[in-house]
Each structure stands twice: as structure tokens, then as C-alpha cells.
Image: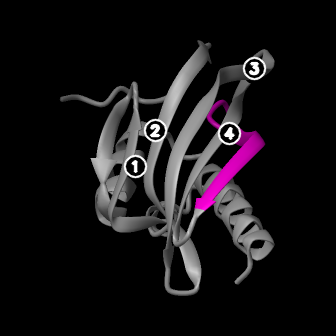
Amino acid sequence: MNALEDKDAIRELLAEYCFLLDSYRLKEFGQLFLESGEWVSRNGSATGPAGIEQFMRQLVPEPGPGTRRKHLTANIVIRLNGDVAEVTSNFLVVRDTGAGPAIAVAGTYHDVVARNGASWRFKSRQLTHDIAGESGLKPVGP
């Protein structure tokens, strides 16, 4: 792959993250991460595909009236370095409420992604919540 193809594949990874999480396909969502991949936010952290899947099942309510959400990713900056890339992007989460759509949170993703065979996977994804509203997430205990 050349640099343009790599960057396009990384953008696809970021988009798949949103689509899989919003459709509650959490097993596939977890598989976007390497075996040692980490997901970190103010809500907690998890490691590896199975650990991330399990954590998301605890954190994210199943989609339905009042719990649907859409993740949007924008302003993507990709710094390639061989088979690894540092990626910074902004995110916005819109959620369903009884009063209509509401912004749940806006922030920044800080990612390290790595080539895994013919695809790219998250080595780490750290979320910074710059503007927090009512997230509608479930509380996760220690």
C-alpha cells in the first residue's frame, strides 16, 4: 500500500468504529483493536478485543427509544510512520432524548493504529471529553 491507500484504510477504521458502536455490534467493534489494544476514557478503560467488547456492554445501553446515538468523527490528522500511525480527530456524539436530539459529548480521539496483515487496527484509542453533556451511558463500577 502507498501512503494515500494507508490513510484511506485508517479513515475506514475510524468510520467502522462509529458504525459498529452505534449499531451495537460490539463483538465486531472489539475486533477493531489489536490483542493488546487499549480503549481509554474518563468512563474507564479496557484492553484487548474481548475486554473492550465486555466493557462496552457494561457502559453502552442497547439501542432503543431514548438510547440511540450517533458518533461522528471529523478533522482527521494522520501521521504515518511505516506500519504505525498517530491519528488525532474530533468526535461528536448525538443521542436520542425525550425532547429530541441532544449533544452527549464532544472531544478528541488520540489514536495509535498499527498495520495488522492487510488491515489497520487500534493499538490505543484515548478519548478526551472536551465538552460533556448528558452522555446517557450506564455507570460502570470499579
What residue is disc 3 on? 102
Which is more N-terminal, label 3 or label 2?
Answer: 3
- Amino acid carrying label 1: it is Arg
- For the residue pair 51 and 141, the one nearer the viewer reads as 51
Q: Is residue 18 left or right of residue 120?
A: right
Counting residues from the N terminus, which is met first, the one under dot 2 or under dot 4? Answer: 4
Rounded to the nearest whole Å, what is the CA distance between mark 2 and mark 1? Answer: 18 Å
Q: What amino acid type is highlighted by mark number 4?
A: Ser
Mark closest to the chain's N terminus, 4 or 3:
4
Which label lies toward us, 2 or 1?
A: 2
- Tell me the SS state at disc 3: strand
Give the secondary structure at mark 4.
strand
Label 3: few (<14), some or many (≥20) within 10 Å? some
Please name whichever residue, 75 or 22, is drawn nearer the observer in this view of the structure.
75
Name the residue type under label 2.
Answer: Gln
Q: Considering the image in quadrants, where does the C terminus appear?
A: top left
Residue at the (35%, 51%) spot, across then down? 38
Q: Quadrant of the N terminus?
A: bottom right
- Observer-nearest residue: 75 or 104? 75
Residue labelled with disc 2: 126
What distance separates the C-alpha of mark 2 from that of mark 3?
Answer: 23 Å
Residue at mark 1: 57
For the residues labelled 2 and 4, say whether their Cβ atoms are less than 8 Å apart: no
Would residue 74 be counted in the magenta stretch?
yes
